[in-house]
Image (cartoon, rainbow, N blue to C red):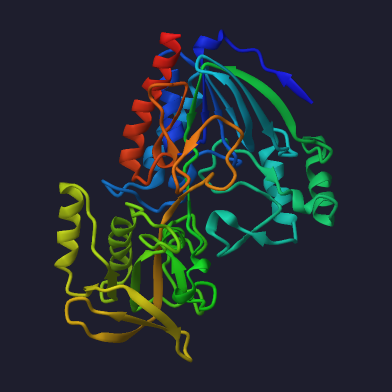
C-alpha cells in the first residue's frame, strides 16, 4: 500500500539517494543550512564503501575518523530523516516538484532490546555468507553489518524465516520481532534529488585470465581492505585464505578489468593509490615481505599522492614491474604463479608468490538496475549531470570514479546545486 508522507513545502525538501560518504556529506550540508532532507539507503546501515575500508587517504585514517562525526551530525539534526533497507522505485515530476516512490524492506525487529538480540544471535546455528566481508567469513541470521553500524540496529535475514533459528529468535526476543512484517511503499514530495548511489567492485571472476575464483590465494583489493581491518574476518591479520599463513611475497595486479575494452574501458582512478596503500598495510605487519606491483602506468594524481608513491619506491622490498599480467597459475602448494612481460626489458617472466591481489575497478552501483527516473547515463552507466535543467544531480562515484576526498568535495558542491534548484523555483 502506498501512502504519502507529510513534509514541509516542496521547495524546502531534498531527497538524497545513497548513504555512503557522498550521500552523508550532501545530506548534512543541506540539512545544516535549514533544508529538510530524506536520506534513502538500500543497506541496513549507512557508511557505504568507506565503512568497509581499513584506512583511507589522504591521512590514512580509519573509517571511524570520517563516519562517526557524520553519524553524530545526522543524529543531532532533526532536518534529516533516514530510511535504511530502502530503495527508490521511481521519480516523477519536474525540478522543484518531484514525487518519489520508495519501498522499505522489513527488518523484522523493533528498535529496542538490543541486548536480547545479541543473546538470540549467539544461540543461532545457521551460518550465512557475510557480504560485508565479501564472503570471507559467515554471520548469523540476526546481525548487524559491523560494530560501526549506524543505525546500531539488528536485522533479520529473510532466508532464516520459517526455520528453527527464527523460532529461537522469537523465544528470546518475544514481541520485539515480527516475522509477518511486509515491505512498505510510500511517496515523498521533494524539490530536488541527489543521486549518491556509489560504486561496486567489478566482478573479478569475469576476468578469465587472472584466476579469481579458481585459485584460493587470489583475492581482490577490497577483500584485502577487509583482511586488514580490525573488525574484518581475521581481526586485522593479513593472511592467505588457503592456510591462514602471513604471506611472505605478494603480487599486486593493476588494472584488473579496468582500461580493458572487454571489461571496464575507463581508468577507475583509485586503484593505483589503493595498491600503494595496501603495500603499507603489508609492510606494517611483515617488514621483510616481498611486494611486486605489476602496472601499465601508475597514476598518482596530485602532489600528496606523488609524494606517497616516491616514499614507497625507497623500500628495497617493493618492486615495480611495468607490464600487464597475461596469465596466472597455481603450484602444488597453493602459491600463485604470475606471468607478465616487462615493458622495459621485453622479457616474459614467471614469478611465484604466496598470494596475489587484483586491483579491480569501480562500477557504478546502479549500472544495470537504475530506478525509473529521467536520468541520462553515459556508456559506462555513470549519471551525467544536466546543470541547465537542474532538479536531479549525481555526486561522488555515481557520477565518475573518485577517491574519498574528491567525493566529499563534490557532494558539498552538489548539495548547493540542489538548494539552488529550490531557491530558483
Residue 327, horizontal then vertical, whole percent: 40, 80
The residue depicted at 17 percent of the width and 81 percent of the height is: 345
The residue depicted at 75 percent of the width and 61 percent of the height is: 125
Question: Horizontal placement of 43 versus 257: left or right?
Answer: right
57 lies above or below 252: above
For this rendering, which residue is in front, 202 or 168? 202
Residue 129, horizontal then vertical, whole percent: 64, 61
Residue 80, horizontal then vertical, whole percent: 52, 21
For this rendering, which residue is in front, 245 or 94? 94
For this rendering, which residue is in front, 110 or 199? 199
331 lies above or below 207: below
For this rendering, which residue is in front, 308 or 165? 308
139 lies above or below 342: above
Question: Horizontal placement of 174 versus 154: left or right?
Answer: right
Q: Is residue 355 visible?
A: yes
Q: Quarter of the image containing the N terminus?
A: top right
Q: Is residue 32 visible?
A: no
- Tell me where residue 373 sits by quadrant: top right
- Marks counted in the figure total 0
Residue 26, horizontal then vertical, whole percent: 42, 28
173 lies above or below 14: below
Q: Which residue ends up furthest to the bottom in the rendered image?
A: 332
Question: Horizontal placement of 119 versus 381: left or right?
Answer: right
- Tell me where residue 406 sits by quadrant: top left
Amino acid at each position: 500500500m502506498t501512502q504519502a508522507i507529510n513534509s514541509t513545502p516542496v521547495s524546502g525538501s531534498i531527497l538524497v539517494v545513497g548513504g555512503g560518504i557522498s550521500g552523508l556529506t550532501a545530506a548534512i550540508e543541506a540539512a545544516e543550512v535549514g533544508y529538510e532532507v530524506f536520506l534513502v539507503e538500500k543497506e541496513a546501515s549507512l557508511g557505504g564503501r568507506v565503512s568497509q575500508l581499513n584506512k583511507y587517504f589522504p591521512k590514512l585514517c580509519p573509517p571511524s575518523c570520517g563516519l562517526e562525526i557524520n553519524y553524530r551530525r545526522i543524529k543531532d539534526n532533526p532536518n534529516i530523516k533516514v530510511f535504511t533497507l530502502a530503495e527508490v522505485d521511481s521519480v516523477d515530476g519536474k525540478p522543484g516538484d518531484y514525487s518519489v516512490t520508495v519501498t522499505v524492506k522489513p527488518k523484522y525487529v523493533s528498535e529496542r532490546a538490543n541486548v536480547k538480540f545479541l543473546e538470540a544471535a549467539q544461540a543461532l546455528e545457521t551460518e550465512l555468507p557475510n557480504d560485508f566481508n565479501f564472503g570471507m567469513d559467515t554471520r548469523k541470521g540476526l546481525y548487524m553489518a559491523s560494530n560501526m553500524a549506524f543505525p546500531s540496529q539488528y536485522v533479520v535475514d529473510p532466508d532464516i524465516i520459517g526455520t528453527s533459528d527464527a523460532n529461537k529468535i522469537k523465544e528470546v526476543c518475544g514481541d520485539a520481532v515480527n516475522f509477518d512484517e511486509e515491505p512498505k511503499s510510500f511517496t515523498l514530495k521533494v524539490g530536488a534529488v541527489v543521486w549518491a548511489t556509489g560504486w561496486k567492485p567489478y566482478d573479478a571472476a569475469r576476468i578469465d585470465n587472472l584466476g579469481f575464483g579458481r585459485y584460493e590465494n587470489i583475492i581482490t583489493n577490497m577483500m584485502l581492505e577487509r583482511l586488514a581491518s580490525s573488525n574484518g574476518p581475521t581481526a586485522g591479520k593479513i593472511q592467505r585464505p588457503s592456510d591462514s599463513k602471513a604471506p611472505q611475497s605478494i603480487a599486486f595486479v593493476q588494472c584488473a578489468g579496468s582500461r580493458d575494452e572487454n571489461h571496464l574501458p575507463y581508468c577507475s582512478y583509485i586503484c593505483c593509490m589503493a595498491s600503494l596503500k595496501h603495500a603499507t598495510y603489508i609492510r606494517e605487519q611483515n617488514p621483510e615481505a616481498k611486494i611486486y606491483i605489476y602496472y601499465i602506468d601508475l597514476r598518482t594524481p596530485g602532489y600528496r599522492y606523488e609524494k606517497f608513491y616516491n616514499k614507497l619506491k625507497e623500500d628495497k622490498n617493493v618492486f615495480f614491474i611495468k607490464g600487464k599480467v597475461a596469465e596466472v597459475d597455481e603450484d602444488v602448494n597453493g602459491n600463485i604463479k604470475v606471468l607478465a612481460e616487462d615493458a622495459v626489458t621485453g622479457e616474459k617472466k614467471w614469478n611465484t608468490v604466496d598470494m596475489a591481489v587484483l586491483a579491480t575497478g569501480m562500477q557504478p552501483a546502479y549500472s544495470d538496475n537504475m530506478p525509473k527516473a529521467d536520468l541520462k547515463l553515459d556508456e559506462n552507466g555513470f549519471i551525467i549531470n544536466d546543470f541547465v535543467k537542474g532538479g536531479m544531480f549525481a555526486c561522488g562515484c555515481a557520477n565518475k570514479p573518485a577517491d574519498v576526498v574528491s567525493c566529499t568535495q563534490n557532494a558539498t558542491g552538489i548539495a548547493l546545486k540542489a538548494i539552488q534548484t529550490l531557491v530558483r523555483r
